Image: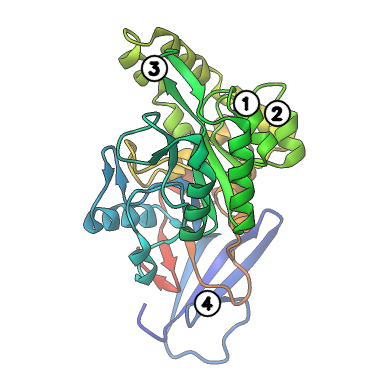
Amino acid sequence: MSDGAVLHIRGRVLVGPEEVRDELWVVDGRVTFDRPVSAADVRTVTGWVLPGLVDAHCHVGLDAHGAVDAATSEKQALTDRDAGTLLIRDAGSAADTGWIDDREDLPRIIRAGRHIARTRRYIRNYAHEIEPGDLAAYVRAEARRGDGWVKLVGDWIDRDRGDLAACWPGDALKEAIAAAHEEGARVTAHCFAAESLPDLLAAGIDCIEHATGLTEELIPQFAERQVAIVPTLVNIATFPGLAAGGESKFPAWSAHMRRLHERRYETVGAARDAGIPIFVGTDAGGSLAHGLVAEETAELVKAGLSANEALAAASWRAREWLGRDGLTEGAPADLVVYDQDPRADIRVLADPRLVVLRGRIVR
């Protein structure tokens, strides 16, 4: 669309799980449900409309080896955008991607700063690698640098034990999470196993990434405290391959990873049934490709969420959780248009007809 043009979308505008409109207008880059008095240049399209999708666990600026250059970061962000992801919670990156905020054609990013991990207990070149006595100071610094989130590595393989193990003692976590909250930031943590979860809960964690270690005993506590999870099921699908690669050296770890994979849908389904907030996240940018938001949303349906619940986890509810506008009067026009109803077939998300970012058609 040219500057000053008006976009008129007719059909079914999915404003929220219970609110559907027949049309909306995009005027001066913003949403309105009131017909403009006059417009010289109007483009009308028909379809099903969703707020711009949300990838709540995505790593722009990162690949399997660490930080990437700006050109690679741009390509990652464009791939996500063209898949309909217009809001990203960047769950840890070693690269400075602040320049993306100045680009009108790239998704909006909410940064968690750089991962904070225990020394030699995470992927090389990804994280600040520190000891527990320094955790609170590093958390405070990343809270000030990020956009309201901090990312911890809660567990990782302990080579002496030969299996997953918690990275931080409870007292260090309490001090660190309190520091983040004092700075106005929320804290999330990478966790595969169950062992690290009780101390994180006791310390006041806000969110858990992957959450494959949720148990029958822990699920009610998550639900009571409304601690969110981002299951990243497209990432969990890689566990059998990882287990096979490490079996000769770490057989206990390999068996553990297989068990977590085998019960992944059961775990997410039980979390859903208990009322734990669940959000879509792909874990793109490490070893996984970008642009997988539709695939991850479909995985949540396989795990027992209804299509409407999965759509909420990828759009309306996720935006509310992250403090960003959806399709409300006067909001920035970040939206995706589909030829068919994604509530009837979640696979429709994989084929957006139009992607509108800041009021401009970008795909």
Q: Which residue is mark 3?
A: 159
Q: Which residue is mark 1?
A: 214
- Which element type, helix, strand or loop, lies under badge 3? loop
Q: Disc 4 versus disc 2: distance between alpha carbons?
A: 40 Å
Q: Any mark on residue 141, and which? A: none
- Which element type, helix, strand or loop, lies under badge 1? loop
Q: Disc 2 versus disc 3: distance between alpha carbons?
A: 28 Å
- Which element type, helix, strand or loop, lies under badge 4? strand
Q: Are marks 2 and 1 in contact (CB under 8 Å)?
A: yes
Residue closest to the eye, 118 or 266 = 118
Question: x, y (%) of residue 173?
Answer: 59, 38
User: In the image, what residue type sits under mark 1?
Assistant: Leu
In this view, 340 is above or below 188: below
Question: x, y (%) of residue 109?
Answer: 44, 59
Colouring of the image: rainbow
- Callout 2: few (<14), some (14-19), or many (20+) C-alpha neighbours within 10 Å? some
Whichever of labels 4 and 2 marks the residue nearer the N terminus, that label is 4
User: In the image, what residue type sits under mark 2?
Assistant: Ile
User: In the image, what residue type sits under mark 4?
Assistant: Arg
Whichever of labels 2 and 3 marks the residue nearer the N terminus, that label is 3
Specify the quadrant of the image occupied by residue 240: top left
Q: Which residue is mark 4?
A: 30
Q: Which residue is mark 2?
A: 219
Regarding residue 343, the answer to whether it shows in the image is no
- Callout 1: few (<14), some (14-19), or many (20+) C-alpha neighbours within 10 Å? many
